[in-house]
Image (tube, helix red, strand yellow):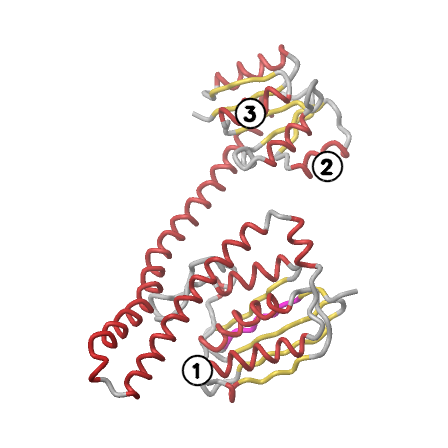
Amino acid sequence: MPKILIVDDDAQLRSTIQMVLKLKGYEVIDADNGVTALKLARAALPDIIISDINMPQADGFAALAELRKDPATAHIPLILMTGESEPSGMRKGMELGADDFLTKPFAMNALLKAVEARLKKHDVVKETAEKKLAELRANLSLMLPHELNTPLVGILGYGEIISTCADSLQPGELAEMGRNILESGQRLQRLIQNFLIYSQLELLRADDKEIASMRAKRTDDVNETLTLVAHTKAQSLSRLADLRTDICHGAICCADDLLSKMVEEILGNAFKFSKPGTLVKVSAMPEGRLLKIVISDQGRGMKPEYLHSIAAYVQFDRRQHEQQGSGLGLVIAKRLIELHGGTLALESAENTGTTATIRLPMPA
């Protein structure tokens, strides 16, 4: 049974609304001012709040602002009631996060329709969130055990051989095992680092001061940074002959290391999903007050429905195409770009290739 909180200093109106909602099967609680309403909302966590704007102690706008600040109540749909028809009041309410408005006097039928519409929308949002959570669980159960265990098997296996058979192993054999242990350790380290970076970025999204600080950083010459990261990544994958670059000189509103991380993750995917011998191109050029960075490959591409489904711990077609990685790289790149006030656009066609276009602000 949905629970509804009614907030109004008019006792008669509050009683009438309460009676109508109860007849429709809703559970109703009420408050006569904003301060009491906030306490009730945090304690009872109603499914919807219907609140007057003009009230003593704390008006509807103040209560709404406080509700939206609190993670426990931020998601609760709120319908504001007002006796004023001025657009400025409605605009202020919408900016604060109101979901709907009712102008007094209103018919009870209009109130019921507004409540039903908000509850239905809330149910859809909840179902979507639950679906995404179920997909995340499925992806975690499919991907993480494999990604953690594979390098560990290599490290433990070669470590055991070296510790028990060191006397009988040739120097060349020891060197090869050492290289394999190093590669496995680096793969595990990368997975852990990306997990930590992703967690930090998710926390940063709600910290305006940190975002402002991040956007104040500068890379003085993108040519130097992008050329270095492109050649380093290509060389590590033995694909230097496949790399083509056309990178301008100029500054960008992003720290050098974070710019490198964005490009490295996208470029890594370009190499991973394209065959040796096919070109991977990196270009950078001004576009108005933005820097446009384009990374393209001639690989297997992505299905259209995947282009709008970039999410953490998701690897597209993993069941059909065995691949390493946690699925975090592209998400990390996208988060970093967005936190810097930029955009990431993907264009792809199956068996043709993928083009990633990054746009980031340049200094004025």
Work out whether mark 2 precedes mark 1 in sequence or the reverse, and give the earlier one.
2
Q: Residue at x 44, y 85 (%)?
A: 276
Left/right of residue 188 with respect to residue 306 in the rendered view:
left
Q: Which mark is residue 112?
A: 3
Q: Which residue is mark 2?
A: 91
- N-term-proximal mark, 2 vs 3: 2
**Amino acid type indicated by mark 1:** Lys
Is residue 44 rendered magenta in the image? no
- 66 over 246 or under it: above or below: above
Category of crowding for the residue at label 2, using alpha-carbon neighbours closer than 10 angstroms: few (below 14), some (14–19), many (at least 20): few
* Magenta span of residues: 353-359
223 up-or-down from 123: above or below:
below
- Image quarter of residue 245: bottom right
Q: For mark 1, what is the residue?
A: 275
Q: Which mark is residue 137?
A: none
Element under disc 3: helix
Q: From the viewer's perspective, tell me whether residue 232 is left or right of residue 219.
A: left
Q: Quadrant of residue 160?
A: bottom left
The dominant secondary structure in magenta is strand
Residue 87 horizontal side relative to residue 37, left or right: right
Identity of the amino acid at label 3? Leu
Question: Mark 2 against mark 3, which lies toward the viewer?
Answer: 2
Return the disc, 3 or 1, that comes first in the chain's sequence: 3
| Residue plotted at (33% across, 84% down) | 175
Q: Secondary structure at mark 1?
A: loop
The foreground one among 199 and 332 is 199
Crowding at dot 1, Cα within 10 Å, few <14 / some 14-19 / many 20+, comes out as some
Give the percent coordinates (x, y) of residue 252: 70, 68
